Each structure stands twice: as structure tokens, then as C-alpha cells.
Image (cartoon, helix red, strand yellow):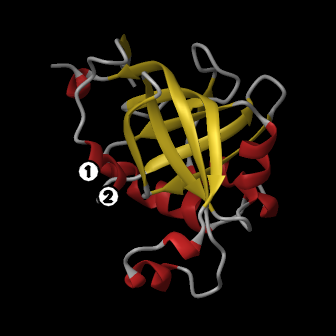
Amino acid sequence: MDRHPLKVKEFVAHPCGLWEPEWFLLTCGDFVAGNFNCMTVSWGSLGVMWNKPFALVVVRPQRHTRQFIEKYPTFTLCAFSRKYRKALNLLGTKSGRDGDKIAEAGLTPVAASLVAAPVYEQAQLALECRKMYWQDIDPTHFLDPAIDRNYPDKDYHRIFYGEILAVAGTEHYVA
């Protein structure tokens, strides 16, 4: 994919649309060591917090990716064109515990520019992030009772804020 470095505060995106109906691929770990995992995510946000651009992701405790985002200080978020929807669906439903789901999905991990976690050759947008905060969702703080319907198993997400350190994207993300 023909991505170019973009200024973090100047890339153009539809922040809600990137999460849903599109999806991001969250990847955590160390590309050089060959120790990383990914999962498709459709819940999160982009913005500014503590005077830093950030990406917020949420990961349930049973997800295999959770151990990677806990262990490693960085992660990436990659967005793809619609032609990769089937691959992203596989990566969001199949566990990395069961084999090489990235190869099965047909994606090619490549080194990121600043962080240890990889990005993907086929991605249109790649955000490189360093964790700066986490917190577990506390259901006693739900102000809308409907939120709890997302947790029939009481497997509340852990929230991770990552400072966006680098952005690379296609012309689609340039003003």
C-alpha cells in the first residue's frame, strides 16, 4: 500500500466511521521478535487527552491480544479498504492461540516506523501508539442501564489510552 507519513494533528479521518462501520486492526507485541498478536476492534475513539493525541482501545479479559497489550508498551491500529473485510472478520473471530490467523487472513505484517508492534502492508492507515493509561470499566458507573447489555458474561473491557506517535496513510487521509 502506498502510505506516506502524515502529521499526527493534521491527518483527515471520520473518527466514528473508522471504528464502525469500518474496523481497525489492533496489533500488540514485538515484530522483530516475532511475538505479536492482533484483533479486530470496532469500539474506541481518537482525540486529545493530557495535551497529547490519543487512540483509545478496549480489550476484554479473555482475548488473546490482552496479554500482548498488557506486556508491551506500544500498539498499532490499522485501517483497511472494504476488500479486506473478510480478513478482518477472521482476525476478530479467530484466536491467535489456535494458529497463525494473520497468515490465514492473507495480511503481511511489516515493521512500523517508531514502535515495536507491526503495521500491515495492505493497510490504508497506520497509527503507532505508546500506552499512557489504562483502567478497567466499572459497571457501577454506567449511567445508561442499556450499556450493561453488552456484558452478559460480565467480562468488562480494559480501556487503554495510547499516545499517537506516528501516522501513515494513503491520499484518502490527506486534507
Q: Which residue is drawn at 53% across and 27% down?
A: 163
The answer to whether residue 26 is left or right of residue 126 is right
Q: Is residue 99 above or below residue 142?
A: above
Which residue type carries mark 1? Gly
Query: Residues under labels 2 and 1: Cα distance?
Result: 5 Å
Q: Where is residue 126 in the image (x, y as percent from the top left)?
A: 45, 29
* Residue 90 percent location from the top left of the image: 55, 63
Q: Is residue 123 left or right of residue 152?
A: left
Asked if disc 2 and disc 1 are in contact, CB closer than 8 Å, the reply is yes
| Residue 20 disc label | 2
Q: What element carries label 1?
A: helix
Please tell me whether mark 2 sits on a helix, a strand or a loop: loop
Residue at which label 1 appears: 17
Disc ID at residue 91: none
Q: Can I make out residue 43 in this image?
A: yes
Q: Which residue is drawn at 39% across and 56% down?
A: 85
